[in-house]
Image: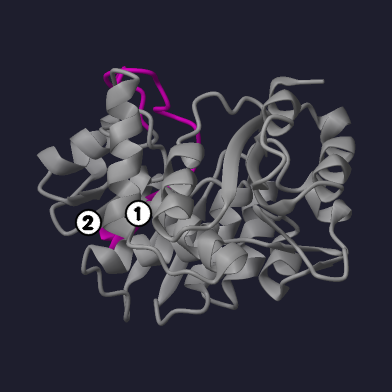
Amino acid sequence: MNRGESAIGKHHSARIACVLGQPVAHSLSPAIHNDCFEHVAVNARYFSCDVSPKNLGSMVRSLQSQHFLGASVTMPHKEAVLALCDTVSPRAHALSSVNTLIPQSDGSLYGDSTDGAGCVDALAHHGVQLQGKSVLVIGAGATARACIEAFSHTNVSRIGVMNRSKDRAHEAVQLASGKGHIAQLSDVPEVDVIIHTTPIGMKQGVPAGETPLPKDLLRSHHVVLDAVYQPLETQLLLDARNSGAQAIDGLWMLVYQAKAQQLLWTGSNPDPMRMRFAAERELARRGR
């Protein structure tokens, strides 16, 4: 029995929710979701479940046999968990990945993806107008693809994808509904919105200088959202601010995708400011 299963066993009366990933010790999702459950008086507890790929299926089956409310899914399981779902949303089907599990009343398991909506909503929270704008997504993994798919349903003009693997980039571009193209570093100064979705810059403590873009490519007209949220101030965001650009940290995206998950699990529509405060309080508790 792993740590997640052990913790779950201590709360038989409450409904169970969790984040499935490896590693997940750093996750802020328990702090965010438990605060939401408390605020709306839902008798549920949310845990971190560190689960290996080979044990993912047995863990999901174990959850389904309990008072299961739902689960978040993070790296490296977003694609593999799709096969464990009985049905999935159209966007999860298009993405071939799931970040949210929702048990149904008939015992079946429904999968959805809230990452893309979290990105778009985080931009909206900061007053970013997408109409006619060009977007650059850095990366082609599950999070990047979710963002590309979500942008394809907005009124952006173009969606560029930049990734080390050109094959993966080409696959991701197919999600852009005809608005996509393979982007190069030379395109960066001309785009309007930059979304970074790779682990580059994910360090504990202060930024260590690692960044996906040379700082001399950043301009004051840019909006830069870095999906990395530990640290909150990545080198990319620091360079963006120094260039006069609007910088949005990854905690906002985490909060808004969690907000969408709460709606799927409980039907509640929590206050994103309260959710962010819960996450910041947990970061302060950890001394970060």
In this rendering, the answer to whether 39 lies above or below 287 is below
Q: Residues within 10 Å of mark 1 (few under 14, many from 20)?
A: many
Q: CB atoms at circles 2 and 1 under 8 Å apart?
A: yes
> Is residue 182 visible in the rendered structure shown here?
no
Disc 1 residue type (three-letter): Ile
**Residue extending furthest front?**
13
Residue 198 falls inside the magenta stretch: yes
- Dividing the picture into quadrants, the one containing residue 63 is top right
SS state under label 2: loop
Q: In the image, is 90 to the left or to the right of 187? A: right
Image location (x, y in percent) of residue 234: 30, 31
Residue 13 falls inside the magenta stretch: no
Q: In the image, is 58 to the left or to the right of 209? A: right
- Figure disc tally: 2
Front position in the image: 276 or 62: 62
Image location (x, y in percent) of residue 180: 53, 68
Disc 2 residue type (three-letter): His
**Residue at position x 58%, y 42% in the image:** 46
Q: Which residue is mark 2?
A: 222
SS state under label 1: strand
Q: In the image, is 4 to the left or to the right of 32? A: right
Front position in the image: 259 or 201: 259
Image location (x, y in percent) of residue 35: 41, 47
Compare marks 2 and 1 and give the one earlier in the sequence.
1
Which of the numbered marks, if any, corresponds to residue 22? none
Q: Which residue is mark 1?
A: 194
In this rendering, the answer to whether 18 lies above or below 231 is below
Front position in the image: 267 or 151: 267
Q: Quadrant of the C terminus?
A: top left
Q: Quadrant of the N terminus?
A: top right
Front position in the image: 211 or 3: 3
Magenta stretch in the rendered image: 190-211
